[in-house]
Amino acid sequence: MPRPRQYDDALRTRLLEAASVALADAGAEGVSLRAVAAAAGTTTAAVYTLFGSREALLDAVVAEGFARFGRVLDAVEPTDDAARDLFRLGLAYREYALAEPHFYRAMFGRPAAPGHDALAEPTFRRLEAATARVVEGEQGKEGVDGAQGAAHARALELWALVHGLVSLELGGHLPGDERERAERYAAALRHSRP
C-alpha cells in the first residue's frame, strides 16, 4: 500500500496564497516563513518539503500569479472582431488584478529574478498578438511588414496604461465607486486603441 502524501496540492495552494499576501504586503524582505506557514495552517517543514527554500516559495508565488493571469487571458476567445477582442483582453486584465490583488502585486512588485521574464512573456505575447490583429486590420495587407513593430510598441503602451490604471485602483488612488471606476477604465481602453 503506498504511503499517503503528507503535503497535498491543497496545502501547496494555501501556502502560495498566504505567501502572496505576505509578499504583496511586506515585500520579499518582510516575508516570514513561520507567519506564512501559520496562515496556511501548517509548519515551516511543509514549506521546505514543498518548495525547498524561502526564495523558491517566493519564486513559486510569482509563477503561480502569472499562470493564473494567463488562464484569465486565455479565456478571452478570439473572434472576427480584433478591436473588440483587444478591448476584452483589457477588461480581463483588470478583472484578474481585482480578483487576485495579492498575486498581482507579487507579480509586479518584486524585481524580476533571472528567468522570470519568461513567466511574463506569454501574457505579453497574448496582448501583442491581439494588438497586431488590430494594427494589421487598419494597415491592410500592404502594411503587414511594419505592423509587427507597430504592434509591439502599441502593446507596450497599452500594457503601461492598463497596469497603471489597475495599480492606481488597487492602491485606492482612483476616485468613485466600483461602477464609476469600471466605466472610466473601459473608456480609457476605448480611447487608446491602436
Image (cartoon, rainbow, N blue to C red):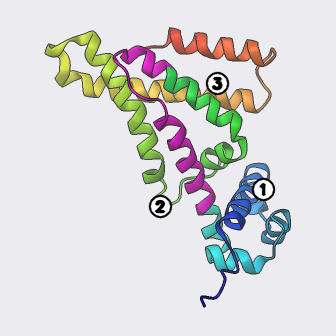
Residue 163 visible in rendering = no
Magenta segment boundaries in residue numbering: 60-87
Instruction: Using the numbered discs, state the Cα–Cα distance from disc 2 to disc 1 in whole angstroms.
Output: 22 Å
Q: In which quadrant of the rendered view does residue 177 lie?
A: top right
The percent coordinates of residue 81 (x first, y second) are 37, 14
Amino acid type, callout 1? Ala
Q: Which residue is mark 2?
A: 114
Query: Residue 184, which numbered label?
Result: none
Q: Estimate how packed mark 2 is, as few (under 14), some (14 to 19) or many (20 or more) residues with alpha carbons within 10 Å.
A: few
Q: In which quadrant of the rendered view does residue 194 lie?
A: top left
Q: Nearer the viewer, residue 193 or 84?
A: 84
Q: Secondary structure at mark 1?
A: helix
Give the residue at x 31% y 17%. Answer: 135
Q: Secondary structure at mark 3?
A: helix
Q: Estimate how packed mark 1 is, as few (under 14), some (14 to 19) or many (20 or more) residues with alpha carbons within 10 Å.
A: many
The percent coordinates of residue 146 (x first, y second) are 21, 22
The percent coordinates of residue 62 (x first, y second) are 59, 54
Query: Residue 22, which numbered label?
Result: 1
Instruction: Using the numbered discs, state the Cα–Cα distance from disc 3 to disc 1 in whole angstroms.
Output: 23 Å
Q: Which residue is mark 3?
A: 165
Give the residue at x 14% y 14%. Answer: 142
Query: Considering only order in the chain, which callout, 1 or 2, is on the residue closer to the N terminus?
Result: 1
Q: Is residue 7 left or right of residue 37?
A: left
Q: Is residue 136 left or right of residue 116?
A: left
Residue 183 in magenta stretch? no
Q: Give the vertical position of 124 relative to 162 (above or below).
A: below
Q: Is residue 25 left or right of residue 182?
A: right
Q: Give the vertical position of 149 relative to 193 (above or below).
A: below
Q: Give the vertical position of 57 relative to 189 (above or below).
A: below
Q: Is residue 78 left or right of residue 70?
A: left
